[in-house]
Image (spheres, rainbow, N blue to C red):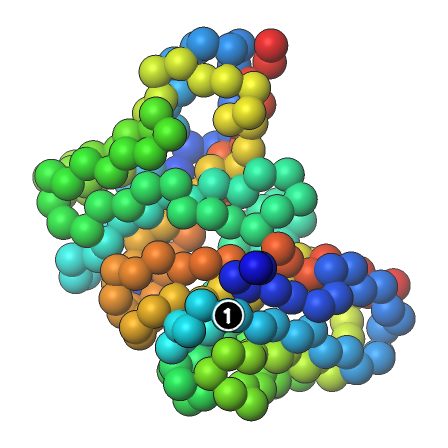
Amino acid sequence: GDSVTQMEGPVTLSEEAFLTINCTYTATGYPSLFWYVQYPGEGLQLLLKATKADDKGSNKGFEATYRKETTSFHLEKGSVQVSDSAVYFCALNDYKLSFGAGTTVTVRA
Amino acid sequence: DTAVSQTPKYLVTQMGNDKSIKCEQNLGHDTMYWYKQDSKKFLKIMFSYNNKELIINETVPNRFSPKSPDKAHLNLHINSLELGDSAVYFCASSQGTASSYNEQFFGPGTRLTVL
């Protein structure tokens, strides 16, 4: 079945550091890909999405490109802030949303 | 103004009890979902309803019974609660069916603790 694998955390960074969270997927069809973010004590929010190969999703300085050849959707941000501390989930949507295990990111001032 | 709301936010109960969690969305969406998030943050879909009709039912014990009285509400009833049911339960909604690429909007979660 469809599945998502993302890099394990936790990840701890200093402010203004570069962030990459790796995400790869396995799917039989042509899924849409998403990154959701969960801030402490809250529900998930959509961060960005891409619906077809080579699409780039971007939001709040975060970017991810749908790479069909490597079945990847890595999340990047060039300069993180303390407010980016959260759990990040990679997900694919074929007939249902399947989530990766989540990566906890902590940004220190 | 809350798009997807859940009640209660916290639920502490004894093993063997029966409890319900309520979810409401005011976005006019067609599809609603229940997810379970365990202590390691792993998130898994449990159920999905489209226009009050069950369309996704993952491998969930039949102690869990979703009920959708109308398109805007999806409640989760749990019978004979067990320790392993302790988790955070999230409700979500989206426009269109679960197979679309539409964004899902999540509620704030209900933290269930079974003692």
Q: Chain of mark 1?
A: B
Residue beneath the point at 42% across and 32% down? A7
- Looking at the rendering, which quadrant does residue B109 occupy? bottom right
Residue beneath the point at 31% across and 74% down? B97
* Position of A21 relative to A6 (above/below): above
Three-letter residue code for mark 1 = Asn
Q: Residue B37 vs residue B70: left or right? A: right
Residue B34: tell me if it is visible.
Answer: no
Q: Residue B104 vs residue B108: left or right? A: left
Position of the C terminus of chain B, as image quadrant, is bottom right
- Looking at the rendering, which quadrant does residue A18 occupy? top left
Give the percent coordinates (x, y) of residue A12: 55, 18
Residue B60: tell me if it is visible.
Answer: yes
The residue lying toward the viewer, choosing from A76 and B8, is B8
Residue assigned mark 1: B26
Q: Residue A13 vs residue A42: left or right? A: left
Instruction: Estimate how packed mark 1 is, as few (under 14), some (14 to 19) or many (20 or more) residues with alpha carbons within 10 Å.
Output: some
Give the percent coordinates (x, y) of residue A100: 42, 47
Residue beneath the point at 40% across and 59% down? B104
